[in-house]
Image (cartoon, helix red, strand yellow):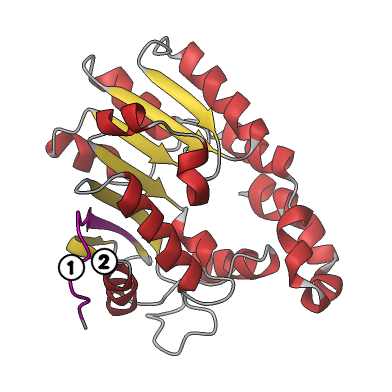
Amino acid sequence: LLDLYAGAYRNNAICLEKLIRNPTTARATVDRVRHARAFENGRRLVPSGMPELIRKLQFNHVFDIGCGSGALLVELAIRNPDFFGWGLEMNPAMCKLARDSIRAASVEKRVKVIRGDSRNLRAVLSANFCSRIKVVTACQVANEMFRVGPSCAVNWLRGLRRTFPGRPLLVSDYYGVLGNKAGGGFHRETLLHDYVQLVSGQGVPPPSVAEWRYIYAEANCRLAHVIEDRATTRFIHVVVLETDAAPKIG
């Protein structure tokens, strides 16, 4: 946590006044090497509840957006010899960490990492590759899309729906609190992460399932199931990437 909050985002805190004047420079100020190092120290950290859910749903061809250190894919591959997974990651330091973790677990024949941006999937993925994917996962990725409101998140979801029509999308994320009147409580970790979201130019994510549901509907995706951690603001949303432009809900 110290490497993450006091390391990767240290310069953002120091340059806060400058970043407030010019928010477009906030993302470039993040120390991506320190960010990767934070996950190296805890490389076995896996999003809570996600491996169990994937195993229960019997998904074994998983595309993990923003795979980070590759912990989720490695965990699933170790437990299931029939599992195949692919991770997408923008940070080159994080890609190296993920590949090192995959080799260390001896699952490199079944787990691969691709460097790329999930907002432009067609630039890095072929149609043949996409046809192999049974489920898409996104852990702590959607919250990066709210610097200027929900429009970027809606466009991101639309891109996923065009690329993986009909497939389920498992979103593991959190409800934001800072600046949201509808925020449910003041969990300290949530407030700290909201602060980091702001100083790094990512914005605070929506504070409730109702607002997330609206965003999914705007992208013509369907929220099918919700799992929430009542002790924090973390959740898993099971979303269906609809195959056609269904009427918007709500």
Residue 170 in the image: x percent, y percent? Answer: 28, 50
For the residues labelled 2 and 1, say whether their Cβ atoms are less than 8 Å apart.
yes
Q: Residue at x 22, y 28 (%)?
A: 60
Q: Residue at x 41, y 48 (%)?
A: 139
Query: Relative to 180, is 86 above or below?
Result: above
Residue 101 in the image: x percent, y percent? Answer: 51, 21
Quarter of the rendering occupied by the C terminus: bottom left
Query: Relative to 235, is 89 above or below?
Result: above
Which mark is drawn over residue 220? 2
Q: Residue at x 31, y 42 (%)?
A: 136
The boundaries of the magenta stretch are: 235-249
Query: Relative to 175, is 140 above or below?
Result: above
Sequence-first disc among 2 and 1: 2
Q: Quadrant of residue 54?
A: top left
Query: Relative to 223, is 92 above or below?
Result: above
Q: Amino acid at mark 2?
A: Asn
Label 1 neighbour load within 10 Å: few <14, some 14-19, many 20+: few
Query: Which residue matches tag 1?
Result: 246
Residue reaching furthest bottom? Answer: 181
Q: CA distance from mark 2 to mark 1?
A: 6 Å
Q: Say how many tags the image has.
A: 2
Q: Amino acid at mark 1?
A: Ala
Residue 187 visible? The answer is no
Q: Indicate left or right for 236 with 7 as reference.
A: left
The one of 179 and 124 positioned closer to us in this rendering:
124
Disc 1 element: loop
Residue 74 in the image: x percent, y percent? Answer: 39, 24
Residue 25 in the image: x percent, y percent? Answer: 78, 63
Q: Indicate left or right for 58 with 176 as reference.
A: left
